[in-house]
Amino acid sequence: MAADGGMHAEHGPRFAERAPDALNNPQLRRNFRRAMDGLMAKRAAQFPDPAYWAELRERGAAVKARALAKLPDLLERLESRLTANGVQVHWAETTEEANAIVLGILQQAGARTVIKGKSMVSEEMHLNAHLERHGIEAVESDLGEYIIQLAGETPSHIVMPCIHKNKDEISDLFAEKIPGLERTGDVDELTAAARRVLRERFANADAGISGVNFAVAETGTLVLIENEGNGRLSTTLPPLHIAVTGIEKVVEYLDDIPPLLALLPRSATGQPITTYVNMISGPRKAGEKDGPTAVHLVLLDAGRSRVYQDVELADTLRCIRCAACMNHCPVYTRVGGHTYNAIYPGPIGKILTPQLQGLDAAGDQPHASTLCNACAEVCPVKIPIPDLLVRLRREAVRPTETPATHLPPLYSTVVKDGGAERSWTESLVWAGWRLVYTRPLLYRMVTRALAWGGNWVPADAPLMRDWTKARAKPRFKPRTLHDLARERGYLNEVPK
Amino acid sequence: MTTTNLAATNTAAAARPAARPDTVYFFGTCLVDMLYPEAGLAGMDLLRHAGVHVVFPEGQSCCGQPARNSGYVEEAREVARAQLDAFPSDIPIVVPSGSCAGMMKTHYAHLFEGDPDQPRAIAFAARIHELTAFFVNVLGVKLADKGAPVTVTWHPSCHSLREMGVSEEPKALLRQLANVTLVENKRERECCGFGGTFAVRQAAVSTAMVSDKLASVRETGAGTLLSGDCGCLMNIGGHAEKAGDGIRCRHIAEFLMERCHGG
């Protein structure tokens, strides 16, 4: 039931067209299957008690929901606290603006080299490419990010960016790209090789750039969690630290952090806590011996405030980027992150990308799901991803209403490029379906006709062909359940 | 039913196990109606054997899920409204599908938001029961196996698990059968890749999923796969048939009826 052909030609291949490449790559399938199985098992081991899990995620969801309810106010409080702490705060409406801000800060400081901690927002900005165009070299210091940077690829997962690669592929890559390194299959040797390269970079970088997991409005604290210590080095060793983050990362109180920390690493990697929990509250103070002399925070909107406008879609902004939804997604596991052709892959990406980029660019994404609910089951902040997928599927076939009407959420259309997926054929099919399925007599006539002639539909008819490629044709039975129930003497209505 | 009555019913239901009803409605589902009527009939016959009067309203058609999941929400709501009309009496509605039951129980309130029929939809949703859960939790049925020894495995649908919260009930029924050995599939909680129109919209991904599912079923060594959802059965069974696999895929109601009452 694809939309009318040709409408999306300008956006390159869509999800369904990209999927076969990944599906036909047995190595990639094995890499993802193995990795996701491991992550699911580790997460499950962290939450053995369903009652505790239910209570904890309730708290996590409540913390984020409360923060979102007060978002404009909290952002102002965050700015004033950070400023009081000596952090310079910048606001960027678009990724272009954010890039310009970061570049401006670096240029003003005369920085030529940057060491980066892992940041999905910087991926959203395509920051490295922007800096490179202006003669600034940014090196990723998270091991996974470092690997994909060497390979010239993008992250395939938001927590484990190079999860699509196995050890052998990394061995080959390192031997090719790291000067003087003999090919080795030993993981410790590979890690040591990356460390040698990165240590040198850390020591000489003019600036460090990082993301932020949570920004605390009450205290002006930037919380950054990581396992490799690269985040701490990136944010403390160079004289200049620039943090970039989305406006939805703000929480109200420092006390809001413990429940979120109890949820995030466990949901993400099955760890009770990450090796490093950095609480950054400002630049080096007089008399202190280390830390950057200047700290900046760039707060990026890039479509988030539009998401925020809708009471139902705003739940998307609760996301703490743990990736549990993708780890548990049977579709993501089969195709990997690159098939989504988006910064954020998997279930969260399927709801976030169309909202940030519009339905013309990404209206097919919400359909890359069976609505199996595995994502909703593990989401630590209770984002109703399957419901939002349905909401976006509806918006994709209905024009966006401007100005927004006050219809119930399910019937509102606020996302950019509403109706981009609309096909007249499909609309007609559902109109006909409605006509038949709301009229009992007509329904019985049609089902009887199908019982009589439905099996004559050839296996290679449109739509049927997509089914029968891998499956036998469904068989209509000569008598419907309506017929059988009547024959067996079942009553049509409750006796008075 | 007024909202006051509904509140009273809910409180009562929370306080003690649901009372055993004399009469129930049967919602056959559109897939069962046309493609698996024998499964629906078996479900009704099992209820009858359990001593319950079964009413099958001829005005019923579909829960509306196919349209809702495709984004045609208004169309889904109108078809859902026709079901509200077709099941007027305040008695349980038993459904031989966790997915259709999940649609009605968990999505109708939202579907009818801002609609004058919302209270009616909420009351309707509260009356929805998945078939196997109804046998175990409401009727407390005791089954006597009359069949030959057989090994089976179970496939729970995603919506029976994650919308209806039905996971142990069907297995508990199968374990009552003396000659039936139930072997659990290590990946039973993973989606089979059906997803309604997903199977044709994302045909390649769906095929990969169902082929993995069939492989995991094969690993159990069971010759029969049972499920409570005909969408999954059409997908897994259709794939098994196409692959020339001997695994038999059947609805649990049909299987139970055959074992306990000779079909």
Image (cartoon, coloured by chain):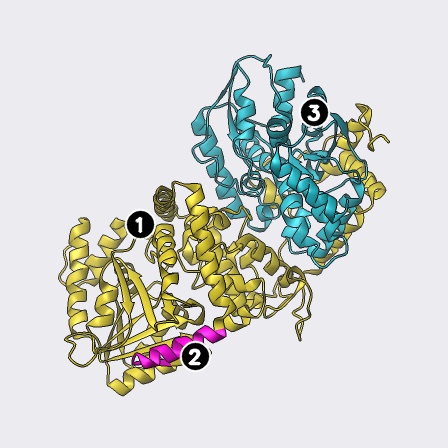
Chain colours: A yellow, B cyan
User: Where is residue A42 shown, x and y percent of the image?
Assistant: 34, 44
> Residue B47 bears which disc, if any?
3
Give the extent of the magenta segment. A72-89
Majority secondary structure in the magenta region:
helix
Instruction: Work out which quarter of the rendered image holds the N terminus of chain B and state it.
Output: top right
Label 2–label 1 contact, CB within 8 A: no
- Mark 2, Cα crowd under 10 Å, few <14 / some 14-19 / many 20+, is some
What amino acid type should be assigned to the residue bearing mark 3? Leu
Q: What label does residue A271 carry, if any? A: 1
Q: Residue A432 at what x, y percent from top left?
A: 77, 51
- What secondary structure is found at the residue carrying circle 3? helix
**Pointer 2 residue:** A92
To which chain does the residue with label 3 belong? B
Disc 2/disc 1 C-alpha distance (Å)? 34 Å
Nearest to N terminus: mark 2 or mark 1: 2
* Residue drawn at 45 percent across, 63 percent down: A342
